Image (cartoon, rainbow, N blue to C red):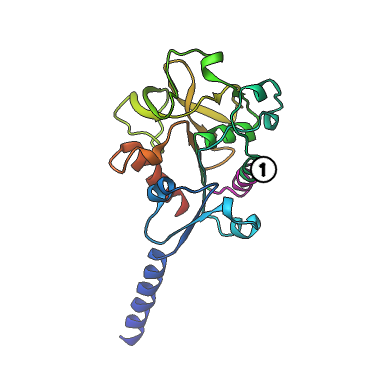
Amino acid sequence: MIKNTLFILIIAILCSCQKQQQRTIILSKASANYVNWIEGDNIIILDAYTIKNTDSILALADGIILTGGEDINPLQYNDTINLAVCGDINYQRDTLERKLFDFAFKNKIPLIGVCRGMQMMNVASGGTLYGDIPTEIGTTVIHRNNGEVNHKIVLLDTCSLIFPLDTDTIMVNSWHHQGLKIIPNKLRVIARSFDGLPEAVVMDKSEHPFMIAVQFHPERLGKDNSIHRTMKASFYKQMAK
């Protein structure tokens, strides 16, 4: 009887510890919106941009999010023409995010890319970018107009990691003037805007178990939004494996 009670107590303690296991998420550059989106019980969030010794936090990473921000230096994808149409370029951030991506890819760490983060995921995988969407694609869809805008996208493929399964078009927010141009074979486009621009991609699972990215901003869609909830839930589920 005592042995059985002791066994049950040990199992209960182990289960309790497992439930309370902390997970560490690294944001390439944090803001309140990203923190509010991805925070949760037993979740530690680190802002890589403010930490000098990146290696020290990579060892702790259970998940990585490449966040939105400035234009990526076109030299990252061997392009000099786009330099003329880029806005501010943050060389420190380009280097940091390539390092975060490479670490996640090599070590199979779950990764989400958001806006610039999706562009970096494409560039780091061997792809290229449109330097300026209105100039190169046109204005059929407005992706930025002195700030954030909204437009519909079309789901090309089923992906329960990002989108609800009961629709083929969905409204998203948008705030960018660059986008994915040449896309490597290891990335699959699962949604596009009506001008053909990629709006969501996933990494082939033969290359990595969980790398997903969107061109819009789920962190600003609000906690009742289905994409906001779905991406967070799938990210948490993958980190728990």
**In magenta stretch: residue 86:** no
Region of the chain picked out in magenta, as a range: 98-109
Number of residues whose C-alpha sits closer than 10 Å to that of mark 1, classed few (under 14), some (14–19) or many (20 or more): few
Residue depicted at x 34% and y 23%: 169
Residue depicted at x 36% and y 82%: 6
The front one of 196 and 139 is: 139
Answer yes or no: is residue 241 visible. no
- Please indicate whether residue 78 sits to the left or right of residue 110 in the image: right
Find residue 106 and report its horizontal and vertical position in percent: 64, 46
* Residue 195 falls in image quadrant: top left
* Residue 175 falls in image quadrant: top left
Answer yes or no: is residue 66 visible. yes
Residue depicted at x 42% and y 36%: 217
Task: Check disc 1 and report the residue beneath it.
Answer: 95
Find residue 142 and report its horizontal and vertical position in percent: 42, 19
Q: Which SS does the magenta portion mostly show?
A: helix
Up the image or down, 228 lies above or below 237; here it is above
Find residue 193 and report its horizontal and vertical position in percent: 43, 20
Find residue 230 and report its horizontal and vertical position in percent: 36, 41
Name the residue at the bottom extreme.
2
Up the image or down, 74 lies above or below 117; here it is above
Residue depicted at x 51% and y 16%: 134
The front one of 23 and 74 is: 74
Up the image or down, 13 lies above or below 116; here it is below
- Please indicate whether residue 197 sits to the left or right of residue 158 in the image: right
Label 1 residue SS: helix
The front one of 170 and 72 is: 72
Count up the numbered dots: 1
Three-letter code, disc 1 = Thr
* Residue 172 falls in image quadrant: top left
- Classify the position of the N terminus by image quarter: bottom left
